[in-house]
Image (cartoon, helix red, strand yellow):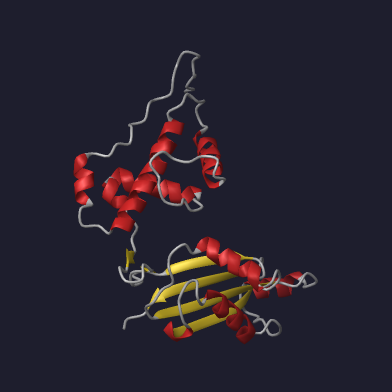
Amino acid sequence: MIFKVWGKNQTPRRRPRITEPRKDRAALAGTNPRLKQRAYDRLAILRAYHRRLSKPRKPGTKTKVMRDFLDDLNSKALSPEGATGPIPHIHRSTLYNWCKFYRDGRLPALVPRYQIKSSTGRPTFRPLKRPIEMKFPGRPRRNGKAAFLARIKRRWKDPPLESPIHLSIFYSIPIPKKTKIPRRMEMLKHRISHIGKPHLDTLNAFIVDCLVGIVFRDHSQIVQFHSEKKFEWWPQIRILIKPFPG
C-alpha cells in the first residue's frame, strides 16, 4: 500500500484559471440578452469558486471547501465579482453540473436551457423529452400542504411544463408495527394489498393539487394517469412524469 505524504513546503496543484476568451463571447452573439447575462453570472460564480479552490489547503478537503463556499454564497456573505443579476439559492449538485458544463462546452454551455419570450419576459420551458422522477420520503400530509409545497419547490427549479404529460404516482405505505413476521413478509412481497386509509383517491387529489402551478400549469395537461399503493418498510412517494406524444 502506498501512502502520499503531504509535506510542509508542498502546495496543492493549481487549477486552470477560468477565462472568457473572445471566441466564447462570439458564440453568444445571437443569444437572448437575459440568458447571456445569466451565463455570465454563472461564469462569475465558477471563477470565484475556483479561486477558493486554488488557495493552499489540505488534501481531501474539497467537499468542505465547496460546502463553505456555498454557505457564504447562499447567505449573501459572498458576492462574486462580475455577477450583476440576483443569485438564486445554489445546491452542490448545481455547482457540480456547472463545472462539468463549462469543462465540456465552455461559456455557451452555461446558457440556461429555457427560452424567454420577448413580449412578457416569462420563461417558457422546452417540451419534456425524457421522464422526470421525484422521490419524497415520509408521509406527505403529516405537516400540511404548505410544507409539502415547499419541498416540491426545492426540488423543481424549472418553469412549469406546458406540454401533455403522463403522470404516475407510487405510494409506499409503512407496515403496521404490531404485524407478525409471516404476515409482514407477505406484505413486503406485495402479496397482501393495502386496504384502508389513506384512500388512493384522497392521496391523488392532494398530490396533484400540490403539483399544479409548480411542475405543470393545469390539470388538463394530464392525459394519462396511473397510481398505486403498496406496503414497504418506509413511507415514500415516487412521482414519475413522462412526455406524452401530441
- What residue is drawn where x is 65% and y is 67%? 147
Residue 85 drawn at (x, y percent): 42, 51
Position of the C terminus, as image quadrant, is bottom left
Asked whether residue 222 is in view, the answer is no
> Visible in this render: residue 24?
yes
- The relative height of residue 244 versus residue 111 in the rendered view (above or below) is below
Please tell me in which quadrant of the rendered image residue 178 appears.
bottom right
Q: Nearer the viewer, residue 62 or 51?
A: 51
- Where does the image place residue 48, in percent across and percent down from the top left? 42, 37
Report the label total: 0
- Name the one closer to the observer, 78 or 245: 78
- In the image as oriented, which residue stretches furthest toward the top? 9
Asked if residue 177 is positioned above or below residue 86 in the image, the reply reads: below
Would residue 115 be found to the left or right of residue 187 on screen?
left
Q: Residue at x 43, y 24 (%)?
A: 12
60, above or below 178, in the image? above
Q: Position of residue 232 (x, y in %)?
A: 64, 70
Tell me: 47 left or right of 90.
left
The x and y percentages for residue 66 are: 50, 39
Residue 43 relative to residue 105: left or right: right
What residue is shown at x 77% (from left), y 73% (from top)?
A: 179
Q: Toward the viewer: 21 or 189?
A: 21
Q: Quadrant of residue 222?
A: bottom left
